[in-house]
Amino acid sequence: MGRVDGKTAIVTGGALGIGRESCLLLAQHGAKVAVVDLQDNEGKAVVEEIKKSGGEAAYWHLDVTDEQEVKKIFNEIKEKYDTIDVLVNNAGIAGDNKPTHELTLDEWRKVQAVNTDGVFLCTREALPYMKQQKKGSIINISSIYGIISAPDIPSYHASKGAVRLMTKTDALLYADDGIRVNSVHPGYIWTPLVEDLGKRSEGGVEAFRQHLDSLHPIGHVGEPKDIAFGILFLASDESKFMTGSELVIDGGYTAR
């Protein structure tokens, strides 16, 4: 029996990286998966892969910063699948790697719009459906940099810190409704987003990856599936006694 049999799961940023692996794993364990992204070709490819494996999924194009589109798409997902049981707020961007005094307000706001506003808008739309059902699991993808920091990409760190505390607030607000809200805090995971940071670094991709490997006591960066398994756990009833928690999956990074 699948660990999330019969549940409907929405995964934002579901086309690539952690989102893609989460969609595949949730579907493998019985969830009906709504793959939500701006990358249409990649998102549709995830749906096709799920269907070829006997799972159920559909793709929706969505900009998580667009309030009216979020409302519209979540309503469509509810109409198609009857319930919204799991929301994985995974969509995110890194932003510009500049010190604070060099950042423009537009550069700052662009990151907050996706990483913070997007989590708020998607959570807000999912909550009424979950409240009606008296159950649900919301999983917000933060970062190790929602717990600690580093001297780079300040707008990203700020956004992930916000997501961490948004998670705890909503966990308290909606516990009586049977809705659990938890955050996941990955270390460096080799995703297209992280690879892009490597391409923009002075030494190039390989040197960047070797540097990241050295930061983790376990000896290497993580893979998207490492995080997807944590998401599957939080989506399942196995984690029924967890809310407001931080699931750190970081190869020992924050233990240093």
Image: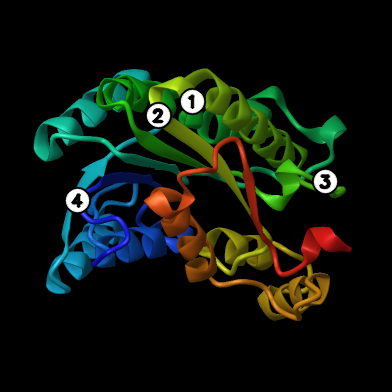
**On the image, numbered disc 2 is attached to which residue?**
178
Q: Marks 4 and 1: CB-CB under 8 Å?
A: no
Which image quadrant for residue 45? bottom left
Query: Is disc 4 surrounded by few (<14), some (14 to 19) or many (20+) residues within 10 Å?
Result: some
Which image quadrant for residue 147? top right
- Sequence-wise, the earlier of marks 1 and 3 is 3
Query: Which amino acid does the dot numbered 1 rest on?
Result: Ala
Query: Which amino acid does the dot numbered 4 rest on?
Result: Gly
Return the x and y of residue 116 as percentages of the image width and height. 57, 30
Q: Is residue 231 shown left or right of residue 14?
A: right
Return the x and y of residue 145 as percentages of the image width and height. 74, 47
Instruction: Relative to 64, say whether 61 is above or below.
Output: below
**On the image, numbered disc 1 is attached to which residue?**
175
Marks 1/3: CA–CA distance: 29 Å
Instruction: Relative to 212, say whether 240 is above or below.
Output: above
- Residue 47, numbered circle: none
Q: Which of marks 4 and 3 is in front?
A: 4
Q: In which quarter of the image is the C terminus?
A: bottom right
- Sequence-wise, the earlier of marks 4 and 1 is 4
Query: Can I make out residue 37 in this image?
Result: no
Return the x and y of residue 122 as percentages of the image width and height. 40, 29
Q: Marks 2 and 1: CB-CB under 8 Å?
A: yes
Marks 2/1: CA–CA distance: 5 Å
**On the image, numbered disc 3 is attached to which residue?**
149
